[in-house]
Structure formats: structure tokens, C-alpha cells
Amino acid sequence: MRLRRIGEPLVRERCALRAPGPGQVLLKVRACGVCRTDLHVVDGELPNVPLPIVPGHEIVGEVVACGPGVSLAAGTRLGVPWLGFTCGECAFCRRNEENLCDRALYTGYQLDGGYAEHALADVRYCFELPDAFDDAHAAPLLCAGLIGYRSWRFAKDARRLGIYGFGAAAHIVAQIARSQGQEVYAFTRPGDVAAQQFALSLGARWAGGSDQPPPELLDAAIIFAPVGALVPAALETLRKGGTLVCGGIHMSDVPTFPYALLWGERSIRSVANLTRRDGTEFFELAGKIPLHTAIQTFPLADANLALEQLRTGKLNGAAVLVP
């Protein structure tokens, strides 16, 4: 399912398979999660999308062929995340900040992704997945889980944690936070009772609309919804010294707000991409908790329907394409 023009539906095409190059594996895709970042690609909200492109960066696949320098048994199950390549040479890479590499390439954005029956991937950026997860339930872990985990790392010391936008990433982070003894306060679209009930079912202490104040001030909050107006709203919920983490790759403009909301040593930070270390840590933790991913599966040919249901907020949990 290929994007040929920004803002238009994906097109179903049959393409010749490419042999894996040095360091690559050819995977038969078993499942691919549908992420909000895919919407940002399709809608042109991310810059310089190379067209045509196959979206999808939450890939679960099995090895069918290896390129030179790779020795993996056929059938080996691997997960392919958003980060698909880094240069390994720049100052960021040398400081173990490969998520900030200026020459990085991203799966489903600059590299063809997993909305397909087969996908190529650089084996250095693939992960082995816990056996506890079947293919479809493992797929959301490759971005919703990984970016959620990286966002949570900056808020893991909070006793009271707010989460804005209770979708794929949030429902995973909520489970991680609860497993570590944190109180979770879930903020949804105003009036979205179904999402609030979903959050409460996962152990949230409180759930309400993003226009409502929580019953107590929070130590930290994470925003997954791509809505800049939530930044000042979330700052109002934080105690002095609290931390606000913006976990998305794209967000609408943040409106001006009084300095008083930031004063008191409150801080705002963004999260960019992920590192392979994040993946190693997260999948080790995911196999222990254990996590449950709420999913709704779609045939590959229904990728446009899955994207539209994500766009309109009709999903609880994550959409997953199954070829």
C-alpha cells in the first residue's frame, strides 16, 4: 500500500521483490501497526516525504533472505522500528544520542515500510521480540511502546503521572507506570467516555477530559496527542518542579501562555525518535510485566480505513495491518 501523492489515499500495487543488500534482511511481514506518525507522513505534516513511499514502522516479520554480512536462520522473527539507519560517526552518534543523528533515516518515511507483504530492513536496527506476544499484539510495541517508553523514562520518578491522549502509546505507558507503582491520571478528548473507561480499566486512578483539572497536582505529565494547546493546559496541572514531556514527532503550534505556568522550576522537554538501547531495555521490561496491547486488526488492503479510523479517534488501542 503505497503513498503516491500527499493527502491522497494509499494505492495498492504489486511490486518486484528486491534482494537484500549488505547488512540487510528481507522480511515477510506478519503484521504492521498503524501509528499516528503514519498520518503525519500521509498528510504531509512531516517535511520532504520522498514519493512514492510505503508507510509503516511497527513491523513484525520473519526472515526470508539475508544480504552479505548477515547470518540469520530463515523464519527468525524480528521487529523493525521507526529508526532505520544512523551514520554512527557524527557527534550525536558518538555520544550515544543516535536518536538525534542528522543523517538518520526512518522506516516508513524515508525507507519503505511495512504496509506490504515484504520489507527490507537494516539488521542492526531490528529487535528480537518477546515470545509472550503474538505477531499482531507485538506490532504496536515497535513505536507506541518504544516512543512511549522513552517518554516515560523522563517521568519515571513521578508518583502522580498524567497522560494526555489515551491511544496506542498511552495505553502501553499506563501499564508500565502502574507496574512501577505510579498513579496514572488519564486525559482524553472532552466527552470521550469510552477512552476514559478504557484508561480506568488499565488501572488509572482518574480519567477525564483534557479540559478538566485532575483531583491533585501532578509530578509529571506526558502529551501524546499532537495538540499544541495541551501544553499550557498540562502545565497548569503540574506541581512546582514538575516535568512536562511532549512525546510526539509532530504537534500543532503551542499557543502563548503566561510565564507563571512555567515558573516554579517546571520544565518542558520533547522526545525525538528512539535509540537501540531504548529497545533493548523496553523489550526486556515488556516480557516481565507482562504488557497487554489492545488492538484492532485490518487486512492490508484496508490500510486507508485503518488510517481514517485512527484520524477520527474511533480506535481504542492500536490498529494493526495483517497481510
Image: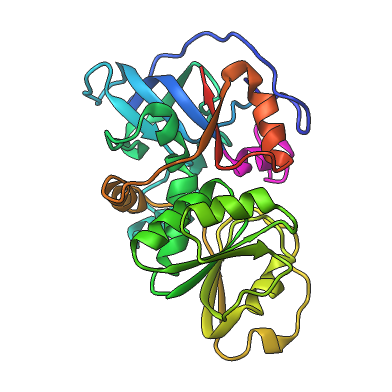
Residues shaded magenta: 35-51
Q: Residue, x 47% and y 39% (percent of image)?
A: 140
Q: Can residue 25 be seen?
A: yes
Number of dots carrying numbers: 0
Q: In this view, does 210 lie to the left or right of 185?
A: right
| Magenta span contains residue 48 | yes
Identity of the residue drawn at 39% across and 27% down:
135
Q: In which quarter of the image is the N terminus?
A: top right
The quadrant in which residue 180 appears is bottom left
Residue 308 vertical placement versus 90 (above, below) = above
Q: Is residue 281 magenta?
A: no
Measured from the top left, where is residue 35 in percent x and y? 58, 40
Q: Using the rendered view, name the quadrant where residue 40 is placed.
A: top right
Inspect this view and state whether residue 166 appears.
no
Q: Where is residue 272 in the image (x, y as percent from the top left)?
A: 52, 57
Residue at 43% x, 75% y: name it.
158
Residue 225 sits in quarter: bottom right
Q: In this rendered view, identify the residue nearer to me: 322 or 270.
A: 322
Q: Residue 128, image x and y in percent?
A: 29, 35
Q: From the viewer's perspective, is 176 left or right of 112?
A: left
Q: Residue at x 41, y 69 (%)?
A: 182
Q: Where is residue 138 in the image (x, y as percent from the top left)?
A: 40, 35
Depicted 112 relative to depicted 105: above or below: above
Q: Would you say 240 lies left or right of 194 here?
A: left
Seen in the picture, residue 213 relative to 56 is either above or below; the reply is below
Query: Compared to 110, does 163 lie above or below?
Result: below
